[in-house]
Image: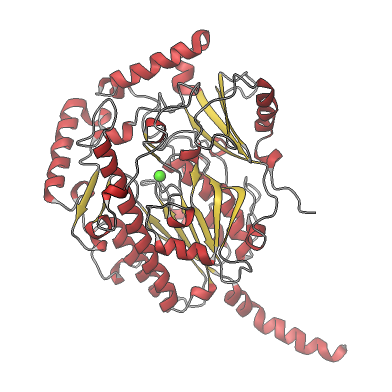
Amino acid sequence: MKKLVAPICLYFCLSLPLLADAKRPNVLFIAIDDLRPELGCYGSPIAKSPVMDALASDGLLFNRAYCQQAICSPSRASLMTGARPDTIRVVENTAYFRELNPDIVTLPQHFIANGYEAVYCGKIYHARMTDMEHSWSRKPAFNRCPFPRKRLPGNYALPENQKLWAENKEKMLAKYGQNGSGGLIHGPAYESADVEDHVYFDGFNTQLAIATLKDHLQKKPKQPLFLALGFTKPHLDFIAPKKYWDLYDPKTIKLASQTISPKGGAATGLHASFELRTRHGIPKKGPIGDDLARTLLHGYYACVSYVDAQIGMMLDALDREGVRDNTIVIVWGDHGWHLGDMGIWGKATNYEIATRVPMIIWTPDMKVRGKSTDALVELIDMYPTLCELAGLPLPEHLEGHSFAPLLNDPKRSWKKAVFSQFPNPALREWAANPLSTGMRQTFFGPLIEKVERGIIKQQGDTWDRDLFENHLMGYTMRTDRYRLVSWQDHRDPDAKPLFVELYDHKTDPQETVNLAAKHPRKVAPLVQQLKLGWRGNGPTSKD
Ligand SMILES: [Ca+2]
């Protein structure tokens, strides 16, 4: 034995740092804005997504992944901090998680602390809340990108659309002033221009990410890289190069099949499609006609295919640079989207269509490939998962569970329930902010009054304007079989819910009938289960 001591010691002394570097995988972290799980690999007969389909066929597809809140900033802030919206107090788009949680350690920040370089291209956090100081260790290689960033007015490439956007901007500013016009300035809801991919933001950012990968590998070949690439499509406006529109025959595009609100559902559970209606050419009230709906769907699918093609270029770059076999790839969407489903357009609800997200993971050494899992998982689980897969310790503040065990055993039993939340969709602005006076003065005023009348009628004596506008929170829980939505005053967790919804996915996967009033015996235990929260509904032990 004694003879072995010296060589073993020598081996470890010399090779541990090298081994650690060589074994620590890169992470390609791909975020897609407003992508609902409508891809070929999710069974869509329409969407053309060959790259993501191929990734899923060699990786693991999550059939039941859910966001924590169906709107950009809260969803992303929760995922990136590993803490839930209520914990970090980010439940609308303008609250900055870093200002409210100065010391919280984000996912890329934790990777940096463990020896990684971390860099982002495109949209990872929301808007200007980029957390540059803490979450990222370098800037992208702008100087090595083969294309310049084009500044397109309103993000449109076609002059006629740029003109419409500029005219609308002038009109809204004149009418409502700077404060009341923030979300109202838009041009058309879609654009098909015969331009190259990099002319628009997502194509440019893909090239930038590829250039940054090359730059990193040349400058720091031994340092593992956390590369985040965030796409802004298929978020409105549905803008994509013409060649992606040409992939689809509009005649084959089917409109939403469930176009009315849930029977007996919460009057406060759905909004009046504010985000879409701000666009030029979209009716400011009333239904969206079938022809327009079909064009909007066409635009959405074109954007999905555009993003899919960019992911293909990014994955090809990993292969070309020889790092694919040491890179974890994860692709996710920040929330779902109602494309006319339940009669509305947009995100920002507590229902399945808005809370369910696409998620695909691929790792070089996963043992099971090309499978999907029905396990209930949440975007908040990504932080501990990536830590586990990269061999990093887990920070104590995390409120999710690593789903790494599912990679090798996709059918194992897992969480009992997952959780999302959204403040009153009907009486909030599109950024989930409380309604401003300015909003009520816009063309939305009558729409708001109409939904408000419905809420007052449903709630009777429990209607309270301040509570419903500023303090109401819908907490929703998805179990294997049910979706429960409990509308309550978030300031008092013990108060009786103001309204409860129950949907049975075994018999009603589109959530068309609220069963809560008819089945109080089913509701009671589920309300108790909801109260146990994520801590009381974690993964079941296999043994
Ligand atoms: Ca989003």
Figure coloring = secondary structure
Q: Nearer the viewer, residue 316 or 433?
A: 316
* Residue 292: image location, x then y, percent: 25, 38
Ligand 1 appears in which quadrant?
top left
Q: Nearer the viewer, residue 17 or 194?
A: 194
* Residue 384: image location, x then y, percent: 61, 54
Q: Outermost residue toward the bottom? A: 3
Residue ID at (67%, 45%): 415
Residue ID at (14%, 41%): 164
Q: Nearer the viewer, residue 398 or 440?
A: 440
Residue ID at (63%, 78%): 19
Query: Does residue 142 appear to the left or right of 162 in the view shown?
Result: right
Q: Quadrant of residue 173?
A: top left
* Residue 29: image location, x then y, percent: 47, 60
Quadrant holding the N terminus? bottom right
The answer to whether residue 103 of the structure is visible from this angle is no
Up-down relation of residue 190 to residue 56 (above or below): above
Query: Does residue 415 appear to the left or right of 200 in the view shown?
Result: right
Query: Does residue 380 appear to the left or right of 441 in the view shown?
Result: right
The answer to whether residue 48 of the structure is visible from this angle is yes
Q: Outermost residue toward the top? A: 461
Up-down relation of residue 414 to residue 214 (above or below): above
* Residue 274: image location, x then y, percent: 32, 31
